[in-house]
Structures are given as C-alpha cells and as structure tokens.
Amino acid sequence: MSSPDHKRRQLLQGLGAGIVLPAMGLAPAIIAAPRARPQMVDGVQSGDVTGECALIWSRCDRPARLIVEWDTQSRFGNPRRVISPLTDASVDFTARVDLQGLPADQSIFYRARFEDAGSGVLGEPWFGHLRSAPKQPRDIRFVWGGDTCGQGYGINPDFGGLRIYETMRQHHPDFFLHSGDVIYADGPIPAEVAAEDGSLWRNLVTEEKSKVAETLHEFRGNYRYNLLDEHLRAFNAEVPQIWQWDDHEVTNNWSPGMELDGRYQVRDVDTLVRRARQAYLEYAPMRQTRGDGLGCIYRKVSYGPLLEMFVLDMRSHRGPNTHNLQREQGPETAFLGQEQLAWLKRELHASRATWKVIAADMPIGLHITDGPRWEGIANGNDGAALGRELEIAELLAFIQRAGVRNTLWLTADVHYCAAHHYHPNRAAFQQFEPFWEFVAGPLNAVASFGPSPLDGTFGPEVVFQKFAPTPHSSPRAGYQFFGEVAIDGQSGSLAVSLRDIHGSVVFSQALEPWQPT
C-alpha cells in the first residue's frame, strides 16, 4: 500500500515540470474550449497553517471565484468545498480561501480552480498538499531563508532557475518561513548581468521588472516575476509558507522620511509604502487582518505543543534611520513599536509551546548601516543599550523576568549564513537569559555583503559564519544558504542546520529544551 508521501509525490510530480494535472473526476459545470476557461496563472500556495486552518491562495486572469476542494486522501473520495468571494482587478485577480475545520496532524490534499464570474465556466485545476499542525507532540521540520531575485540576479534558465527552492522542497518540510525580501522592488532585472568571474548571467525579463517599482502595477509585477519559476511554483504547491517583509518589498533601507534616489519619479516614500504594502498583502498567502489600520503583518502561528512562531514586522512601525544613540525611548528609537512590543511580550508570556521561535526581519547584533546612519538595531557602541537597542533590552529583560523559556531567533537579510550566541557574561546589558540567533540566505541574490562586525551590547559571539570570499558573487558561485530546524517529537530537542544550495550541511547546532529542576 502506498505511503502518504508517495501518494503526494505522485499527485504533485507534474507541477515540477509545469504540467497541469487532469481534473480527477471533477466535471466542469460548463464544457468550454480551453481559451474560454479562466486561467490559474500563478499556481497555488498555502500559508499560515495551524491544526485546524490553512490559507489557500491563487490568482486568475479575469473576474472569477476560487473553488478549493480538500480531502485527507489524494483520490478525493469525500471532498469538502470552499468558495472565495469574487476577485477582480482591484486586487489584481488574486483570491484566497481559508480552509477551516481541518483534522489535526493530517495530510490535506487540495485541488483549486477558478469559476468565471460571468459565464460560470470552470478552469483546469491545480493540485496542492499540506500537513496540518499536530495536537500531540511529533517530529517537526521546517526551513527558512530570505532574499529572492536580488541585485539583478533573477530567474536564469541556464542555471536552472530558482534552484534552491527545489532543494528545499526535496527536504519535505512542514512549512517554510520567508524571512523577508520576498521581492526586490528596487532591483530591476536586466537581460544580462556580469558575474564575479566575468561570465554572463542571463535572466528572464519582464516589463514590470525593467525599472524600480513605483506604481501598484509594478509592485504587483515583482511578485508575478518570481512566480514565473517552475521550481517556486512546485515548492508553493507542496510547502506551506509563513511570510514576513523587510525593506526591499519597498526600497532599500526604507524608513519614515527617507529621501528617494534619482531613479524614482515618485518622491514620497509613504506613497511607495502604501502601494508596496497593498501588493504584498494581495500576494502573501496569509490571512487578512486590519489590526493596525493598514493590514497587520506581525502575527503568531501556532504549530502544536512543541512550536509557536512569532512573526515580527520590523519595518512598518520603526522610526527613521538615525545615529541610533538616544538614551531614552521615543518615536526615533522605535523598531517594533510599543504596540507590537506589548503584543509580543503578552503572547510570549502566554505561550505554552516548548519552543518559541522569534522570526525577525533583521539580526540583533550585526552592524548594518544606511550611509552615516544605522539601518539595523545595533549602533556600533558596545556599551549600554541606546537607540533602537532600548526596545530589545526591554524585551529581553521581560523574557527573563517572566520566565519565558526556549526562545530561538531566526533571521536573514545580510546575504550569508551565521550562528550567533548571545550571553550576559559577555554583554554590557546583562538582564537576559542566553539565547541563539541563526541567519540564513540569500536564496537567489548576490552574496555576500558581509561578514559584518557584531555590537557587544548584548554579548554576541560568532560561533559560525560562511560567506562568499569574493564580494557581490552571483548565485552560480554557490554561496546561497537556507536554514532547517528539526524538533524531535519525543525528547523535544531541537537541531538547527545551515545548508547550501545543494542541501549540504555547512553547520549544525543541537539545543536541548529547558526543563524545570
């Protein structure tokens, strides 16, 4: 008898080659010529999966409704159907449905297709798979990384496209955390880029990616560009996602009041942010909420008794990039913002999960500059917490005071991989428990901008780092990295591996959960 994984691979194997599978018994309400059928132009994605819910996303070529049928068996003997509201041009024909009432810890097979709003004609289906979160402890594996199609390195058919997504797919993770820079809206993709060895890197090109994104149409086009890649579409159909965003979803190093460079005709960064945020929320496979008046990006995703993900937004609520040396907290020192910080403290304190993963847009201690100002949290001053470090000090002190155990920080952003250990014995600010921060990336972008120095305020130590010896190397050089987290269902122990584009482990670290004595 075939295993669930074998059935899943049989069901989805056509997606990796860009093949649309037959309807498997789902008869269209109206028989129509292929050209008349609504087209599912970007495949399917799932996101923010819990034990009972999963968000399914897709996009059509016309006004239509998304119809999703799901079952725990790949033969769809007893499918349940969910239909989306009408999608139209106001949301770029994107659509989503929230599957609810899922059985916990089950393989969920789904088939999605669009129904034309006017004629009722049904399109061909795409198939996807996910696994719902468990209610009881079991083994969990997920992957993370950031930075896709950056610095002019886009989809190169000669290289095999976005190969690292196929590598990650073959590890069969429960889900994928995209740690930001999902797109590079400020990074045009030319037909050719000169690589570090003098060879040419040849890209697929589109009109929307030929310049920096300024209009809503151009921001949307950045997401559509990435979805041209067959590896990414196959990955999306098989691996649920958790997205967060960073600067390149808008423009490099953006913060309130920044001055845009001469490439931009739109001079107001707030206008760019509104358009970029709308496109992000249209294309991200996440639930739509209006908690902060704009569409809340920070959120918690619970994945059973062993794991909760606390997904941060270090962009929307920050103050301007400054010299970052203020002694008192205020609007200029905001990084998470007081509302998000209060939410994070409250949710961490309430969590009963063994491991509490804090998904951050940026590393805590690395020097990350914005010209003469500071882009990140650190400020190059190894002494007491100042500027944006004040919020982090408040958070770390709360975690210690509230007895929150087993926190783990995951991030990307700097285009190399690293393992940092933070300890109060090495720190100027000492009111916290030791913790780990792991950095992965890039997924398909230039490597490397580092390594960057570490700020001593919170006592970090570089335990491992790997980066391209030649700065600004292409993906062809091989210094593309993703991270993998594996949690043992019986012991609760956790192992972090940093892997290269081929899937080879370059570093691993085992962590044991804190146990009361």
Image (cartoon, rainbow, N blue to C red):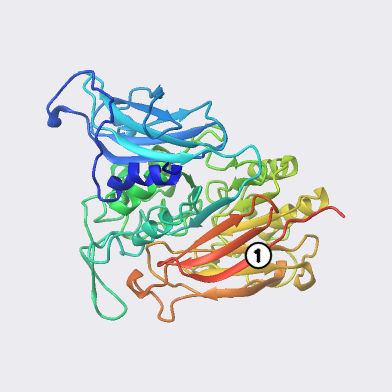
* Camera-side residue of 67 and 454: 67
In which quadrant of the rendered view does residue 37 lie?
A: top left
| The C terminus, quarter of image | bottom right
Percent coordinates x, y for residue 120 in the rendering: 23, 18
Is residue 452 something that shows in the picture? no
In which quadrant of the rendered view does residue 322 lie?
A: bottom right
Is residue 282 something that shows in the picture? yes
User: Against 378, is 283 above or below?
Assistant: above
Q: Secondary structure at mark 1?
A: strand
Percent coordinates x, y for residue 111 in the rendering: 35, 32
Q: Residue at 38% of width from left, 72% of height from top?
A: 478
* Camera-side residue of 240 and 425: 240
Q: Residue at 81% of width from left, 50% of height from top?
A: 403
Instruction: Determine whether, in the image, residue 495 is placed left or right of residue 95.
Output: right
User: Against 182, is 136 above or below?
Assistant: above
Q: Residue at 62% of width from left, 52% of height from top?
A: 358
Instruction: Determine whether, in the image, residue 179 is placed left or right of residue 209.
Output: right
Give the residue furthest to the front: 1
**How busy is the neighbourhood of tag 1: few (under 14 within 10 Å), some, or many (20 plus)?**
few
Q: Residue at 80% of width from left, 60% of height from top?
A: 431
* Camera-side residue of 118 and 354: 354
- Exactly how many numbered labels are in the figure? 1
Give the residue furthest to the right: 517
Percent coordinates x, y for residue 52 in the rendering: 55, 31
Instruction: Determine whether, in the image, residue 17 is placed left or right of residue 303.
Output: left
Q: What residue does disc 1 label?
A: 510
| The N terminus, quarter of image | top left
What residue type is disc 1 on?
A: Ala
Percent coordinates x, y for residue 297 in the rendering: 52, 42
